[in-house]
Image: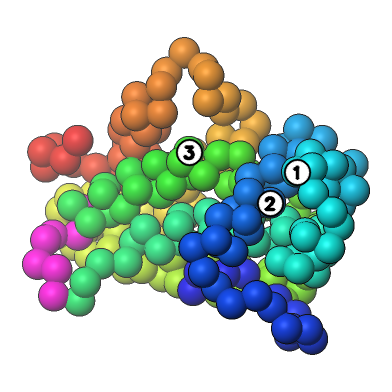
């Protein structure tokens, strides 16, 4: 899945070409900046059009409305984050390696997709039921994979925890709460932030001395 769940198209769209992709991305970049600075309600299509220095039909050719832009921006980080526990079926590595790698990937994806990764935390009321259902499906998939790997790792003696689901949610709350305080120009650069938060997440899951991290 790479695009957000959306209403059926009722008008012809431009064929996807490098040129149309570039224009679409330009719209998304400007809108992301405005949403992050002003919030959804205070950002209008007119403002997006003005920032782009284009006509309204230019934007409406690519997106039906402001909500579709917001959901498109939000869906990318949702997919990036909630697929970080997906590993090939024939991946022979032990569970603790997959979990630690997956949590690090989750944290990195959250930071990489700043600020759009935080829109769902800041303004959950904006999304359509269809979007929320798709996002929930992704999240359930992620937690099923994570909990399964956690229990496997515990059986193998790599993790020390009691409640699987609580442990999984606690570890993932670290990147989740970044929206409250993370700033890309902060004291730690993104790579350093990923390393620090990953170590904290590994402590939450009770990672034993297996050499990870």
| Residue 213 quadrant | top left
Dots 1, 3 in contact, CB < 8 A: no
Q: Specify how the rendered protein is coloured.
A: rainbow
Q: Residue at x 40, y 42 (%)?
A: 108
Residue of label 2: 27
Which mark's residue is nearer the viewer, 1 or 3? 1
Q: Residue at x 46, y 55 (%)?
A: 81
- Seen in the picture, residue 197 relative to 48 is either above or below; the reply is above
Question: Residue 177: horizontal and vertical position, in percent?
Answer: 58, 38
Q: Start and end of the magenta stretch? A: 90-96
Dots 2, 1 in contact, CB < 8 A: yes
Residue of label 1: 52
**Frontmost residue, 116 versus 206:** 116
Answer left or right for 119 relative to 173. Answer: right
Answer left or right for 80 relative to 133. Answer: left
**Frontmost residue, 2 versus 176:** 2
Distance in Å between CA atoms under marks 2 and 3: 21 Å
Q: Residue at x 61, y 26 (%)?
A: 181
The single residue placed furthest to the top in the displayed view is 187
Residue of label 3: 111
Q: Would you say residue 173 is visible in this rendering?
A: no
Local SS, label 1: helix
Local SS, label 3: helix
Distance in Å between CA atoms under marks 2 and 1: 7 Å
Which mark's residue is nearer the viewer, 2 or 3? 2
């Amino acid at each position: 899945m790479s695009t957000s769940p959306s209403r059926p198209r009722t008008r012809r769209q431009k064929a996807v070409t490098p040129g149309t992709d570039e224009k679409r991305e330009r719209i998304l970049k400007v809108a992301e900046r405005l949403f992050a600075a002003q919030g959804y309600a205070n950002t209008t299509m007119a403002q997006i059009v003005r920032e782009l220095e284009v006509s309204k039909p230019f934007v409406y050719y690519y997106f039906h409305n402001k909500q579709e832009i917001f959901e498109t921006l939000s869906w990318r980080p949702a997919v990036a984050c909630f697929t970080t526990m997906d590993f090939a079926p024939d991946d022979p590595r032990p569970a603790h390696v997959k979990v630690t790698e997956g949590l690090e990937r989750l944290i990195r994806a959250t930071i990489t997709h700043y600020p759009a990764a935080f829109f769902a935390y800041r303004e959950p009321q904006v999304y359509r039921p269809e979007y929320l259902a798709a996002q929930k499906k992704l999240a359930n998939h992620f937690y099923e994979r994570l909990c399964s790997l956690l229990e496997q790792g515990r059986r193998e003696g790599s993790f020390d925890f009691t409640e699987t689901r609580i442990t999984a949610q606690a570890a993932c709350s670290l990147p989740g709460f970044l929206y409250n305080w993370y700033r890309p120009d902060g004291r730690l650069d993104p790579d350093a932030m990923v390393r620090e938060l990953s170590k904290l997440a590994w402590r939450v899951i009770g990672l034993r001395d297996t050499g990870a991290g």
